[in-house]
Image: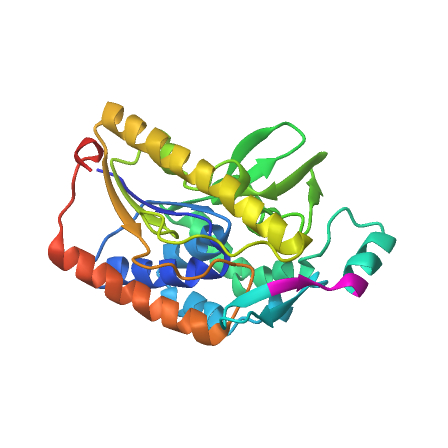
Amino acid sequence: MKRALVISGGGSKGAFAGGVAQYLMQERGFDYQLFVGTSTGSLLISHLALNNPEKIKKVYTSVRQEDIFSHRPFVVKKGKFGEKQIGIDHFKVLRNFWRGSKTFGESYNLRTLISNTLTEKEFEKLQASSKDVVVTVSNLSLNQVEYKSVNDFSYSDFCDWIWISCNYIPFMSLVKKDGCEYADGGFGSMVPIEEAINRGATIVDVIILETEMTYYNRMHSRNPFSLLTNMHAFMLDRVEKQNIRIGKFVAGHHKAVINFYYTPTVLTTNSLIFDNKQMTQWWDSGYLYAKSQNEETSEIHPQDS
């Protein structure tokens, strides 16, 4: 029996996933042999595989916009109902284009944060362990999704793949690596359940950073950036639902068990906004939500869910 943890993309909402994973590992004692993540999930899984959720919790609950963006292309504003919105930082966007960038903003600070958080010694410990840590990236040049295992790369390359998995273009960096252009893994595989089962998982715990049902209408687009984020959110929602359907289908054929953990409420409609106070609350609520779910339910087969 091989147990896997899959964490979807979701930007700042990854804090909720961290809380869920911490409960499952520390309180339920689940021993995962395989960790598969997309985008923010890719940031979490190396530290979870090292059984060190407290370390990555400190990062998620203290991170600022400046820790992610080397050139942030937007400003955060409050709407008339108190909600947070993003508006274009025209000067920074124009400066980025003048510098020859293909994107509105750059996220090189995130690459630095990744290597400062996951040390080379920890990387070597992962490679020496029986755990497999796999991150999802989108190869735009070859029009395909790729999965990068910690066991197949050097420390620097694997940190690059984690970073690439999180690069939500056109707001973050478009990365050229191995002769191809790469971006956020969520553009192709938002919830990589199928990959976990293809790698031999028989029980898969899946953390999805959206509600199971749609409970809201998005605010009308107020500027080109909010239109882009709404458009991206719509497309990624379609990708996510397709990933789940395919995952259930593959699980049925392999007689695998899937346990789903959705967010019980809408956390945010803009996961590019990193608010450490809010993310601290999300981590704690994720922990409590996983506890309540495990008190009420047991493992079920996907065809029954």
Image vertical order of residue 250 relative to residue 276, above or below: above
The question of residue 89 being in magenta is answered with yes
Q: Is residue 250 visible?
A: yes
The picture places residue 243, in percent across and down from the top left corner, at 40, 35
The residue lying at 64 percent from left, 27 percent from top is: 142
The residue lying at 25 percent from left, 57 percent from top is: 24
**Residue 232: quarter of image:** top right
Residue closer to the observer: 108 or 277: 277
**Magenta stretch in the rendered image:** 86-91
Q: Is residue 156 visible?
A: no
Along the horizontal axis of the image, is 132 left or right of 104? left
The residue lying at 37 percent from left, 62 percent from top is: 16
The picture places residue 249, in percent across and down from the top left corner, at 29, 27
Image vertical order of residue 150 relative to residue 200, above or below: below
Q: Which quarter of the image is occupied by the C terminus?
A: top left
Residue closer to the observer: 209 or 76: 76
The question of residue 262 being in magenta is answered with no
Question: Which residue is farthest top?
Answer: 253
